[in-house]
Structures are given as C-alpha cells and as structure tokens.
Image (cartoon, rainbow, N blue to C red):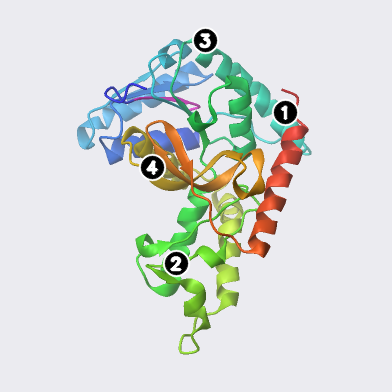
Amino acid sequence: MNTDKRKVVLIGTGMVGMSFAYALVNQGSICNELVLIDINKERANGEAMDLNHGLAFAKSNMRIYAGEYSDCKDADIIVIAAGVAQKEGESRLDLLQRNTEVFRSIITPVIKSGFDGIFLVATNPVDIMTRVTYELSRFGAARVIGTGTSLDTARLRYLLGDYFTVDPKNIHAYVIGEHGDSEFVPLSQVMLATKPVLSILDNPKNSYSLDDMHSIEEQVRTAAYKIIEAKNATYYGIGMALARIVKAILGDENSVLTVSCKLCGEYGQRGVFIGVPSIIGRNGVKEIVELDLTEEEQAKFKASAELLDSYFDGLKL
C-alpha cells in the first residue's frame, strides 16, 4: 500500500458516502487524494465539484475528482458505500442477494484494475456484505474490513459518559456482535477509566443501577430505528466512523476499533465476519483483541455469529 500518496476511492456517493467524504475534507490530513465513483457519473461529478469549492475553507489540501474503476489501481483504500434499498415486502435474504450482485459489479472491475490495498465496507447489513467482499475479492482477511459496531460503540460511550457525567473518551466499553438486533454490550468489560463499571454499580453509595445499564444498551441497539423514524436515514455518524477507520489505517495508528472482521477461532468462531475490538494499522486488521467474556456473554456472541452465518449460507455467490 502506498502510504505516502494516501489515496482513497469512495464507491457510492449517497448520503453515507458523502458524509464520509465531507468528514475527510473537514478533518484534514487524512488523505491526499479522494476519488468518487458512482453508477450515476453526473452525480459523482457534481459531488466532487461541491467538495472542491469548499476546500478554501478546509484544513486539508486534497485532490478530489470523479473517477473510473481504473483509478482504483494505486489506491490505498476502497470504501464501499453503495447498495440497494429494501423494497416493500422484500425479505432480508432477497435484499442481500440483490446487494451481492451489486457488489459483484463493483468488486470485479476493482480487482481487474490491479488494486492491492484495503477494502472498507459500510453497506448494510455490513457484516454479511463484508464477508461477501472477502469471498468475491479473494483478498487476505486482514485487508477486508467492515464498519461493524464502531458507530454502536461510539453511541454507547456517549450515553455512558452522559450517565456517569464523564468525558466519553474516558469510558472504555464496546458493542460487539452483529451490527443489528443481536448486538450486545459485554458489561463485564465496561470500564470508567480503570474502574470496572460493575463495581461502581455494586457500591450502595451510588444511585447508578444495572437496570439503567440495560436501558442504555437498548438505546444503543435501537438508535438507528429512531433516527430513521425521525429523518428517514442515518449517515453523519457512520460517515465519521468511516473517516476514523481510514485515519487509523493511513496513519498506521494501531488503534483498537470495533470493526467487522473475520474470526479464525476467536470467541470459538471461524469464518464469520462480525464486530469485535481489533487493532487497526496500515495493513488492516493487525490483531483481534479477544475479550474475556462471561459464560452468558459468550452465549450471546455465539447466537449473534450463528445468525450471521445463517444469512450468509442462504446467499448464492
């Protein structure tokens, strides 16, 4: 990967993709070159123009343009935010099958271009679409990453910080599992600075309660539904999550982020792509950080992994 050039190609210029692009421009110094690809070439051109016109106000000095799949050849990262929406009465599996065909039409020309970097997937259901990307690309597992539960984890830390009146940056907690209804918070691993939150809850002098923790977990799990109900879609949060992951890769940060990646025996699972804390650097997933889950938490994780496996097994690749 050419880390000096720091070139990112975004495929899909919808609200998620452009929220990511806008975050890149405003955060500055993450990448030097941003290419926009969309089936609607006129839209990609318009989005590139709009972003370029704001560069005078931004921290970054980026080259931004609408491109073709041939532009993927020397890219460091391909971000996929393209996909189709679910039709009325359509099953989740039918939607998955249609999105699989969309991904086939994307990944085939990307590979033909000579691309040899990292795939970063945002399209939902992200865990399964990341696995589809892995299967279609035949890339090493470390170089195929999904946004996983990175945004869910950010939501959790925000809510816990608000609850304990602490800067969310000092809350160490993760949402793991499917980016969806079977995700969960391993409370045994939640820390306020270096203090386990469960020990804080056990202190009779505090007004904090386990019921409140379960309520916060439910708020995290249902946050997307509430946002969609209010404004039809979610895009700012996931756009910023994408920018954060790209920054970790191009900066070789070795940061721990809850991304969707392939398990090879961790948590007793193999083959499934699922949201887990992972060390992310310039070559993608450097290491999966395996949490010391309780028996109950391990059962929840297994159920989430099996659900993802069941959906993937129903696909025709």
Q: Nearer the viewer, residue 60 or 112?
A: 112
Along the polypeptide, which appears first: circle 1 or circle 3?
1
Along the polypeptide, which appears first: circle 3 or circle 2?
3
Res 244 label: 4
Q: Nearer the viewer, residue 191 or 10?
A: 191
Q: For the C terminus, which image quadrant?
A: top right
Closer to the observer: label 4 or label 2?
2
The amino acid type, in three-letter code, at marker 1 is Gln
Instruction: For mark 2, give the secondary structure.
Output: strand
Instruction: For mark 4, give the secondary structure.
Output: helix
Res 97 label: 1
Closer to the observer: label 3 or label 2?
2
47 up-or-down from 15: above or below: above
118 up-or-down from 195: above or below: above
**Residue 287 place in picture, x, y as percent:** 47, 41
Magenta stretch? 7-13
293 up-or-down from 107: above or below: below
Q: Is residue 36 left or right of residue 229?
A: left
Closer to the observer: label 2 or label 1?
2
Residue 9 lies in magenta, yes or no?
A: yes
The amino acid type, in three-letter code, at marker 4 is Arg
To which quarter of the image does residue 309 belong?
top right
Q: For the N terminus, which image quadrant?
A: top left
> Do callouts 3 and 2 mark residues in contact (Cβ within 8 Å)?
no
Along the polypeptide, which appears first: circle 3 or circle 4?
3
**Residue 89 place in picture, x, y as percent:** 79, 39
Residue shown at the point (56%, 56%) measured from the top left = 223
**Residue 249 place in picture, x, y as percent:** 37, 35
**Residue 176 place in picture, x, y as percent:** 57, 52
Task: From the image, tell me which residue sits under label 3.
Answer: 112
- Magenta stretch, main secondary structure, is strand
Residue shown at the point (45%, 16%) measured from the top left = 115
